[in-house]
């Protein structure tokens, strides 16, 4: 058993964190207005570039850093754009650019996509993550640190 609480972010530490992510100055994701996030450091629960930037931070510390696409949501894949006949969409789905969709592939796995454009006969879908290919500007504040319990490490999530 580790007796002393962790001083800084390290592997197997449960981190409570506020964060904001901006792309070109616009906020695209944030814990503001909701609860801070909690995760076990070193388990790949975050995108790689974010997890790496947190090592060594103490509770109460703020940090700003930039994450490149390779350490974030990857580069945009031009092959992940698809034309789908309009008739394949149920009538309740609004066919407008920007609409986010949750689709199932042949294996029943869920895939997220968003509508790029709507033509006369087809709808163009983009299956890339909305933040693929983007430089992400993070601003974080560490709120609390504690060691993960053996049970949490075993389960791979925070209790
Ligand atoms: Zn559990």
Image (spheres, helix red, strand yellow):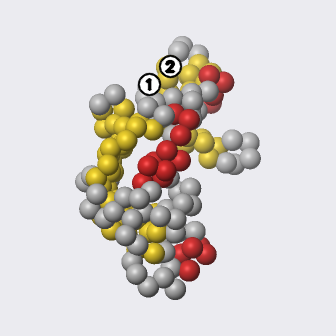
Q: Nearer the viewer, residue 72 or 112?
A: 72
Q: Residue at x 56, y 80 (%)?
A: 150
Residue count near mark 1 (Cα–Cα under 10 Å), binned few <14, some 14–19, many ≥20: some
Give the answer, above or below, for where 41 lies relative to 136: below
The answer to whether marks 2 and 1 mark residues whose Cβ atoms lie closer than 8 Å is yes
Q: Which residue is mark 1?
A: 97
**Measured along the vertical axis of the image, is residue 93 above or below residue 152?**
above
Query: From the viewer's perspective, is residue 156 above or below residue 115?
Result: below
Residue 120 visible from this viewpoint: yes
Give how far apart the Cα atoms at labels 2 and 1 are. Answer: 7 Å
The x and y percentages for residue 107 are 74, 47
In this rendering, is residue 95 above or below 18?
above
| 70, 32: nearer the viewer | 70
Side of 108 relative to 13 (left or right): right
Q: Quadrant of residue 111?
A: top right
- For mark 2, give the secondary structure: strand
The numbered mark, 2 or 1, whose residue comes first in the sequence reads: 1
Q: Mark on residue 118?
A: 2
Q: How many marks?
A: 2
Q: Which mark is residue 3?
A: none
Front position in the image: 64 or 149: 64
Q: Is residue 36 left or right of residue 52?
A: left
Asked which secondary structure carries label 1, the reply is loop
Residue 155 appears at what percent x and percent y?
A: 59, 73
What residue is shown at x 51% (from left), y 33% (from top)?
69
- Does mark 2 have its CB less than 8 Å from ligand 1? no
- Coordinates of residue 108 in the picture (x, y in percent): 69, 48
Residue 34 appears anywhere in the view: no
Q: Position of residue 52 (x, y in %)?
A: 49, 50
Q: Nearer the viewer, residue 7 or 99?
A: 7
């Amino acid at each position: 058993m580790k007796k002393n609480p962790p001083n800084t972010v390290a592997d197997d530490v449960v981190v409570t964190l506020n964060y904001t992510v901006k792309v070109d100055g616009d906020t695209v994701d944030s814990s503001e207005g909701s609860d801070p996030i909690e995760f076990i450091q070193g388990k790949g629960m975050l995108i790689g570039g974010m997890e790496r930037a947190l090592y060594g931070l103490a509770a109460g510390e703020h940090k700003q850093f930039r994450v490149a696409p390779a350490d974030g949501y990857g580069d945009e894949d031009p092959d992940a754009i698809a034309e789908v006949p309009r008739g394949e969409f149920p009538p309740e789905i609004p066919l407008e650019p920007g609409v986010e969709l949750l689709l199932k592939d042949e294996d029943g796995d869920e895939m997220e996509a968003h509508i790029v454009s709507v033509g006369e006969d087809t709808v163009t879908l983009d299956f890339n993550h909305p933040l693929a290919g983007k430089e992400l500007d993070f601003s974080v504040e560490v709120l609390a640190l504690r060691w993960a319990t053996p049970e949490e490490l075993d389960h791979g999530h925070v209790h």
